Image (tube, grey):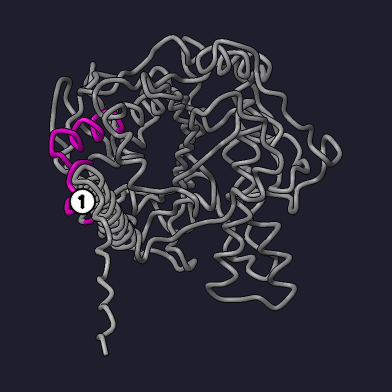
Amino acid sequence: MTEPRRRRRRRKARPPLPARAARAAVWAASAVVLIASGTVWTAYRTITDGLTTSDALDAARKHAPRHLDSSVNLLLIGLDSRKDMDGNDLPKEFVQDQLHAGSSEIGYYNTNTLILMHIPAGGGKVTAFSVPRDDYVETLYGDGTSQGHHKIKEAYSFGYTKAHDTLSAEGVKGPELEHRSREAGRAATLTTVQRFLGVPVDHFAEVNLLGFYDIAKVLQPIDVCLKHPVRDRYSGADFPAGPQKLDPKQALAFVRQRHGLDGGDLDRTRRQQAFLASVTHRLKSQGVFDDLGKLRELFDVVKKDLVLDSSWNVLDFARRAPDLTSGHVEFRTLPITGFATRGGESVNLVDPERIRRTVAELTSGGSPSPSPRPSGPGDAKAPSKNTEKKPEKEPEKKKPEKKPDEPESPSPTAGDGSDTTVTAGGVPCVN
């Protein structure tokens, strides 16, 4: 009996060497991508953990002009508030001695700094537009309805106050009341700025006085240059002419001074621009944007005072930083047409159409983006008689705009605010 023939097993043909190498490369690349993604995610979470984020742009985007390209518009908001994130007064001694900012009863929730940074598609020169805080414009709530005509800095405080009154009546209190009221203030500011400038806001960052001080503390000494010596008892500014290095207290006085300057508030705007130019120069020279450890150290100090919109990827912004720190930023102050008194207060008169044309020409070389009209009546009544007023249940906390012995902001003696530009990448000399 013959034994059955044993069937020989066929070996599976191995793919040729180039194919195997290609497959291994794909696996390796996939592993690298996964590891890199995990590293970036971990770094992002480490940097932003504990940072206050805001969804205020969600409401503002509904009323934003349309984007004409893939450029990015970033709004920097400087809040003139002596409160922490939960609405508690900052320590009196700190406000008076270090900030030289009067008492916690001053300032309320006005935005003393509004700077829109336009980052063009594909990189290149960044244009930063400073909006003078006393520009008299139609301000809006976050839903696009009109607050009436006020100083642009007051859009935040009107939005805050209306929400605070409504939420208080509903029984909301404590930190939640403060957080939700501030969100309404942010949405009002974003919607107002978009309408006034004729461009959408893609991201924003908000910092208060304490945050400014903390930033200066991390990056000190702050290099500045003055064309003339100055001395001002209101801000505490007391500096000689020429280049100098400032500590945090002096840096705050430098950007807050407006009395004794020929351009008044407009010169103060240029001081703010010069400070930002100096800070970006120092960030580059210290390699902060190229070093996640240094970036984390910076955020660890300022995150308690800083608010970013929730859709902003900080690491992605850091990759754009070379354009912001290499002299490719030009600061411009938007023009005014004159000065007047409205409601007993000094204001800047502006031509909104001229503003929108100026911004459009410098960002896209074309016409302004179509903007939705406010959805409410053109001159709706504000939520309270005085922007500087807290909710009715706290009448003792009215917020005067200035110290009792402080005169109105001086009117500039010359210029419309647009005759001087400040370029980043060094230390510009200003009045």
Q: Nearer the viewer, residue 35 or 42?
A: 35
Hey, which quadrant is residue 144 in on the image? Answer: top right
In the image, is residue 289 part of the stretch drawn in magenta?
A: yes
Position of residue 398 in the picture relative to residue 328 (left or right): right
- Which residue in the rendered view is the most extreme toward the bottom? 1
Q: Please, which residue is most extreme toward the right here? A: 377
Quarter of the image for the N terminus: give it: bottom left
| Mark 1, other Cα within 10 Å: few <14 / some 14–19 / many ≥20 | some
Residue in front for this viewpoint, 67 or 183: 67
132 with respect to 148 (left or right): left
- The percent coordinates of residue 344 (x first, y second) are 67, 34
Side (left or right) of 320 relative to 168: left
Residue 323 is at least partly visible in this image:
yes
Q: Which residue is mark 1?
A: 292
Name the outermost residue toward the front: 1
Q: Which element type, helix, strand or loop, lies under badge 1?
A: helix
- Report the residue at 67% width, 31% height from top: 65
Magenta region: which residues?
Answer: 276-296
